[in-house]
Amino acid sequence: MEWEIKRSSNGCILCNKEFSEEEEYYSALFDENNTFIRKDFCIPCWDNGKKEGLFSFWKTKTPRKDKPAQMQINTEILLDMFVKLEGNNKIHQKNLRYVLALYLIRKKVFKLKSLKRQDNEESITLYYPREDREFSVLNTNLKEDEINALTSELNQLLNYPYQEQEVFSTAD
Ligand SMILES: [Zn+2]
């Protein structure tokens, strides 16, 4: 099945309040029937809301209006997703984990330790110095365009609507 990313609107998913400038709020990824759904919550709604299917979350803040729009992906969030995808046997999730591994190697979070071939499958052993532990990742043999497609899905999932809006806004 196709893996799909849905994203919420520009305010709190529960009370529909629009976030104000520099307001702190929570962004969360939910795994609903193998579809990652990003939802944003104001702090009171987050504290009171049900979090069924919660996969990963982080606290964030809307940018100041006079600041230039900036695409920021937090390495910690990606690392958290990577760790939580361990042991997931769905092909799309395995692919995603592989792409996250590539990114985290490039960001020097992980060191490439070794490659192992077994039963026509190649797995990569990564070393994570900060916690002195290793991870094993299946090489899912993605082509470059598949890697690019997954990377852009991740960007869409993690991007902040406010910042996107700033880029495209013609108002004021
Ligand atoms: Zn709310």
Image (cartoon, rainbow, N blue to C red):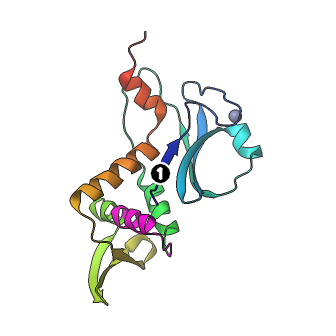
Please give left or right for residue 67 compared with residue 42 in the image: left
Residue 12 location (% of width, % of height): 64, 34
The image quadrant of residue 26 is: top right
Q: Secondary structure at mark 1?
A: loop
**The quarter of the picture showing ligand 1:** top right
Q: Tell me if residue 120 comes above or below residue 84 in the rendering.
A: below
Say which amino acid is labelled 1.
Answer: Glu
Q: Name the quadrant of the C terminus.
A: top left
Read off the magenta span. 87-100
Residue 6 included in the magenta stretch of the image: no
Residue picked out by circle 1? 4
Q: Tell me if residue 169 comes above or below residue 70 in the rendering.
A: above
Asked if one can make out residue 28 in the rendered structure from this viewpoint, the answer is: yes
- Local crowd at mark 1 within 10 Å, few (<14), some, or many (≥20)? few
Residue 97 location (% of width, % of height): 40, 66
Q: Tell me if residue 65 comes above or below residue 138 in the rendering.
A: above
Looking at the image, which residue sits at the far right?
A: 48
Please give left or right for residue 165 compared with residue 10 in the image: left
Please give left or right for residue 156 compared with residue 114 in the image: right
Please give left or right for residue 53 compared with residue 135 in the image: right
Q: Nearer the viewer, residue 100 or 96?
A: 96
